[in-house]
Amino acid sequence: MIEVKVPVLPESISEATVAVWHKKPGDFVELDDVIVEIETDKVVLEVPAEDSGVLTEIKAKEGETVGEQQVLGIMEKKPQDDSKEAPTAESDSTKKETTQEAPEEVTKEVTEEATQEAQQNSPELSDKGDASPKGNRLEERVPMSRIRKTIANRLHSATQNTAMLTTINEVDMSSILSMRSSYKEAFEKKYSVKLGLMSFFVKAAVESLKKFPTVNAYIDGDDIVYHAYCDVSVAISSDRGLVVPVLRDAHKMAMHDIEKSIIDFSVRAQDGTLGIDEMSGGTFTISNGGV
């Protein structure tokens, strides 16, 4: 018997949610095949097979909350050939019958899925019925993903535990925009990455932090802890939600390194493959009001 367990979770994360099972009971699983995906507050973790065998039981269904090292499913170590039963005349007949009916079933399933997606993304407002407050009011409740819950909880916590202050300063960007326009083609040709604006912002932040090290520090009890480095967090929007990965040693990075790192972060944020350690430990954060 082989137990499929929740892997060791990163520090400060105690639980996860079962996102998707890629195998079902009875399926043969090769070594290192992804059996199931679990979702933490920030990333999706793949749980691969530690050995080959047949998945016999699922103990944690999709949507369930699980803890570190909890058993997700059970596998039996069997060779692939043994897991397949010899076909019979009845099974051949069933196979033929299924093959003939499959196109209609698939078409129906795809049509229903497309209809559901259209209804979710483009809700139709009814112009019929009672317009009074007591009339029908259709609502749809969609459970939040773990990452959405975490974002909501942290924003709520920030309003209760910090002094909220907004300072707006207008900056003349004409010289930077002019420089970017003049050098963007040569920059892209040389470094194979486009010259964006974030690299300018990171560089400006780093130089400011060098000048005012207190902004790059934090309070620990009665002490002020000063960092001898600048780890700049950058806010990146993805389909999974807002993530804030860290540019380690940003004070040592060239502009093309910054741009390449941000593109890499963006791609992996969409895939959900950013590591927890990549989104913690920043000493300064640059947020973009447009994401």
Image (cartoon, rainbow, N blue to C red):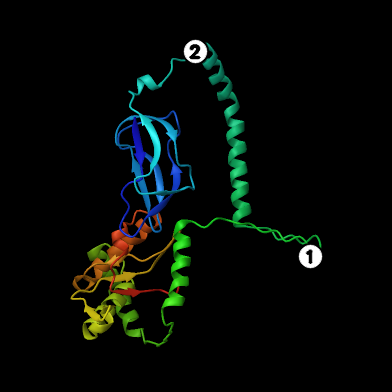
What secondary structure is marked by label 1?
loop
Assign the N terminus to one quadrant of the image.
Answer: top left
Q: Residue at x 59, y 38 (%)?
A: 109
Residue at horizontal 62%, vertical 32%?
A: 104
Query: Where on the picture, by quarter, is residue 217?
Result: bottom left
Compare residues 124 and 18 and report the one nearer the observer: 18
Which residue is under mark 1? 134
Q: Nearer the viewer, residue 74 or 287?
A: 74
Residue located 72% across and 61% down the image: 137
Residue mark closest to the camera, 1 vs 2: 1
Give percent across and percent down for residue 149. Answer: 48, 61
Residue 126, position in %: x, y? Answer: 74, 60
Image height of 28 relative to 277, above or below: above
Mark 2 residue type:
Thr
x, y (%) of residue 199?
29, 73
- Distance of mark 1 from mark 2, alpha carbons? 62 Å
Regarding residue 77, the answer to whether it shows in the image is: yes
Crowding at dot 1, Cα within 10 Å, few <14 / some 14-19 / many 20+, comes out as few
Which comes sooner in the sequence, label 1 or label 2? 2
SS for dot 2? loop
Q: Point out residue 281 in the picture as x, y percentages from the top left corner.
A: 28, 67
Q: Residues within 10 Å of mark 2 (few under 14, many from 20)?
A: few
Q: Does residue 291 appear in the picture of this structure?
A: no
Residue at the farthest front position: 222
Q: Quadrant of the C terminus?
A: bottom left
Total marks in image: 2
> Who's the residue at 32% across and 81% down the image?
176
Marks 1/2 in contact by CB < 8 Å: the verdict is no
Residue linked to disc 2: 88
Depicted 274 relative to depicted 216: above or below: above
